[in-house]
Amino acid sequence: MSDVLSRRDLDFLLYEWLDVAGLTTRPRFAEHSRETFDAVLDLSADIARKHFAPHNKKADAHEPTMNSDGSVQLIPEVKAALDVYASAGLIAGQFDESIGGMQLPATVSRAAMAFFQAANAGTSSYPFLTMANANLIATYGTPDQVRDYVRPMLDGRWFGTMCLSEPQAGSSLADITTKAVPQDDGSFRITGTKMWISGGDHELTENIVHLVLAKTPGGPPGVKGISLFIVPKFLPNGDGGAGERNDIVLTGLNHKMGNRGTTNTLLAFGDGTHSPAGQPGAVGFLVAEENRGLSYMFHMMNEARIGVGFLAIALGYVGYLKSVEYAKTRTQGRPLGAKDPAAPPVALIEHADVRRMLLAQKSYVEGALALGLYCSRLVDLQDSASDDAEAARSTLLLDVLTPIAKSWPSQWCLEANSLAIQVHGGYGYTRDYDVEQHYRDNRLNPIHEGTHGIQGLDLLGRKVVMQGGAGLALLGEQVSETVARADAAGGDAATFGAELQDRFARIVEVTAAVWGTGDAALALANSTAYLEAMGHIVIAWMWLEQLLAVGAKSGDFYDGKRSAAQYFYVYELPKVTVQLDLLARLDRTTLDMSPAWF
């Protein structure tokens, strides 16, 4: 079985570039060392290879089904793998020691999770959502809520979800209709329907903890009236176990083109099937304050957005590795200019166009992995900062990068999967090889946790203009610092640095121009193009950072990094010029056309 990720690349990014071992000088991570980080990565790679990867294709072919009693049937290998994962303590990795966690850096935890995401996207989704759910409750919940819900999730006995969307509302959360009515005992009764809930029902654990957005009576309209509630499938029994059944009913399973091993559900809250104490509605418990639910949920959503970016990276990366392996072993055709027609065929990798496709994949997946780990390190700097100013800078830069870290990998690591199929030729789109499944699994990620359009609106409409443009200015400072080091290094680094600085200066000009009209609709009409352009500029920055970390080191690994950096600057970065020209023209095509013209 081929590797699902390159451990050599992870070691380079974590230790030679980001100096994650240096985080252990900070009090929060002082109990750790590179040895403990390596132990977690080694364990994760081993479990992913032995327990997650083997049933990836089987879970895809035998997706969840709903039994006549309303329960869910999954292949047994899913639970077996998750039991191994939970028993290894990996769910608790990033959490505070005070609540049973290992207090690992987010950078290490994300790298460890990437092994599982690459090995089996469907099965890895259950702990991924559970960790994000538990992190939100640990941040905003009461001590009792942490005791009752977070600790069982960190033990792996309970799993968690996020319940935002509704059939009629989709991504428009202002239009949700789920209601929460307060009770005399301080709880709420929840009624409504939630759609597209990953991990929403199963028999994998003793309980499922749902985080549900709902509106309370008399609240303000729109998103300002949304509150957040903990709504467990089974109510806690007071001693850490699951007690009475709550009024949550699985009414259907959605069948998606990928991630088929993850249940995706339509859930009814409070339809009367399991009403506790005979009263209508599912029992829910308010998280923190009323009418601030969306701001709390963004804590989980932003974590999930970076996590979705990592899933896209992992799927692109494993497809890349498999296409490299195939290209090295599959013989077909003869070199251009070969004079002997009877000469034996050569390996696919000997053909220039195949090397182009492999190099494109490498530049996408390794560039995206660098961005994901860089954002994770910002989380660590934010959580371990010695003063408020350092924490604020890390938070601000992370805010700007989050829509890019979600969307760019979802678009371009999917393209890597497409190229992996192309390298395999006719075999690539058959189920005899894995790359077609990796593509289908990854195709969900441009939609998961907000489409490209939503991320583009977030980036151009909020992130680069908030605080008077402070986020964009901070990003510019970081890019300029890298460019200055590249200029001092000379050679290709200096050349690439000058190109990067020019493109960044141009996008700053374009940002000012699109907002200079005072017309928000016009400014945001082409926000997706802005997102794509900024994404390519940021990945070019990540490649320049990697090139500087390579320096004068020799060997095939470092030469491969140099080639990938060169490819990105020669083939990819020039693409942003057309997008920036479009944005600068303030094009009205999409605004001025009539729906009747379709």
Image (cartoon, rainbow, N blue to C red):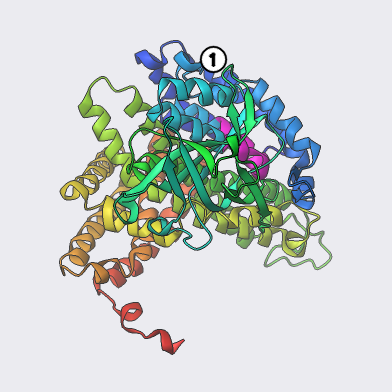
Determine the residue positioned at 73% across, 47% down: 70
Task: Determine whether, in the image, residue 353 is placed left or right of residue 34.
Answer: right
Which residue is at the front of the view, 560 or 396?
Answer: 396
x%, y% of residue 193?
A: 54, 53
Q: Quick check: 460 above or below 3?
A: below
- Name the residue that disc number 1 marks: 35
Front in this rendered view, residue 16 or 461 = 461
Q: Say left or right for 339 vs 277.
A: right
Percent across and percent down for residue 251 are 66, 53
x then y, percent, for residue 196 = 57, 53
Inspect this view and state whether residue 48 appears: yes
Magenta span: predominant SS is helix
Q: Which of 70 and 475 is in front in this view?
A: 70
Q: Assess whether residue 125 is covered by the magenta stretch.
A: yes
Q: In which quarter of the image is residue 480?
A: top left
Q: What element carries label 1?
A: helix
The amino acid type of the residue labelled 1 equals Glu
Q: What stretch is highlighted in magenta?
A: 112-128
362 above or below 86? below
In the image, is residue 203 part of the stretch drawn in magenta?
no
Residue in the image at 29% along x and 23% along y: 385
At 28% from the left and 44% from the top, the residue drawn is 479
